[in-house]
Amino acid sequence: MSYKFVKALGRNYSSRSRYGHGSTVKGITIHHWGSTGQKHANVVAWLRGYTGNRGSSAHYVVSDGLVTQIVDESNAAWHAGNNQGNGTTIGIECRPEMTAGDWATLVELCADIERRRGSMKYYRHKDWKNTACPGKYSSRIGELVKAVNAALKGKPPAKPKPSKPSKPAKPKPAKPKPAGKIPGPRTDFPWPDGHYIGPKDGPDRSHSGYFKNRKWSGHYDEHWLKALPQQLIRRGWSIGKGKTYLSKHGIDGRYGAEYEQLIRAFQREQGIPVDGLGGEQVWREAFHRPVS
């Protein structure tokens, strides 16, 4: 083992039987942890579940020369957004930059897992859920399998090949919001740092849309709670009465179970920490990040 191994078990996990499966692990699901520039330690702290996150986790967090275990392999981490994925696979969160060192450490960890548990089937997070995760790793799964097999045979792991620049696709007039564009106005986060869209029984920094005397950036909370799903509609989401999200109450500017479900789905798609609260990072992803 050439990487440093740290065991820092968290509280965000369940038994595999909760998802209808036994303790047998059949595969490995590859993730990336979202935005570039984040620190390994910060990702670990969030996924362990002691700093407010009670919706997501992983078995391992991996970066160049460092592997941190958060959930025991015999348990199910909350990583796939899918019962079978959670129940039968090991979730590995990888550094989105995917340097040669990141890649080599991932290969070595996967080989170590296969030495303990036998041959694994490899999945991308997007194989379980509609998401852009695992980013740069998505097109490398075949290479990862070959590199792990080579490592098991005693050969050094192959470095990932650089992506070939692709020719720009011609825009289709029928699609008003082509990928790579930021739809709608690039609206700034309306509240102070540390505030978020959340339940009405939360602290003062939780904005639920239920209180009429709270005005921020020129509008009441209800206005801003409506602005977020309206922006997601511009990004192509099915939102409103009778649709995929907010199907019962529609865009009423009130935070409840449906609104939380919408935020969680968006966080998973963007590959950012999932907690169901609409903080500044959620807002930035919706209003400032191009559609991928």
Image (cartoon, rainbow, N blue to C red):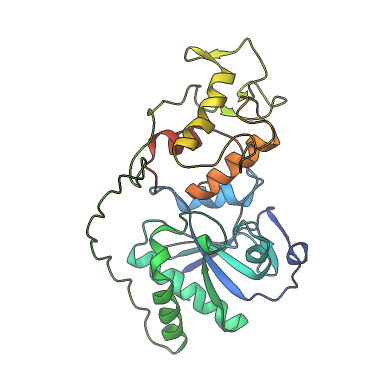
Quick check: 183 left or right of 214?
left
**Which residue is drawn at the image coordinates 48% and 47% (left, top)?**
270
**Which residue is drawn at the image coordinates 66% and 15% (left, top)?**
211
Quick check: 239 left or right of 188?
right
In this orientation, does residue 64 appear? no
Vertical side of 258 occupied by 134: above or below:
below
**Which residue is drawn at the image coordinates 69% and 35% (left, top)?**
248
Quick check: 181 left or right of 253?
left
**Which residue is drawn at the image coordinates 64% and 24% (left, top)?**
208
Which one is in front, 72 or 129?
129
Q: Going by the picture, which residue comes out furthest to the bottom?
A: 153
Which one is in front, 24 or 74?
24
Q: Going by the picture, which residue comes out furthest to the top?
A: 213
On the image, which quarter does residue 135 sit in?
bottom left
In this orientation, does residue 155 appear? yes
Vertical side of 43 occupied by 19: above or below:
below
Q: Where is residue 41 in the image (x, y as percent from the top left)?
A: 50, 51
Vertical side of 267 occupied by 89: above or below:
below
Q: Where is residue 151 in the image (x, y as percent from the top left)?
A: 43, 83
Quick check: 52 left or right of 269?
right
Q: Position of residue 243 (x, y in %)?
A: 61, 41
Which one is in front, 123 or 273?
123
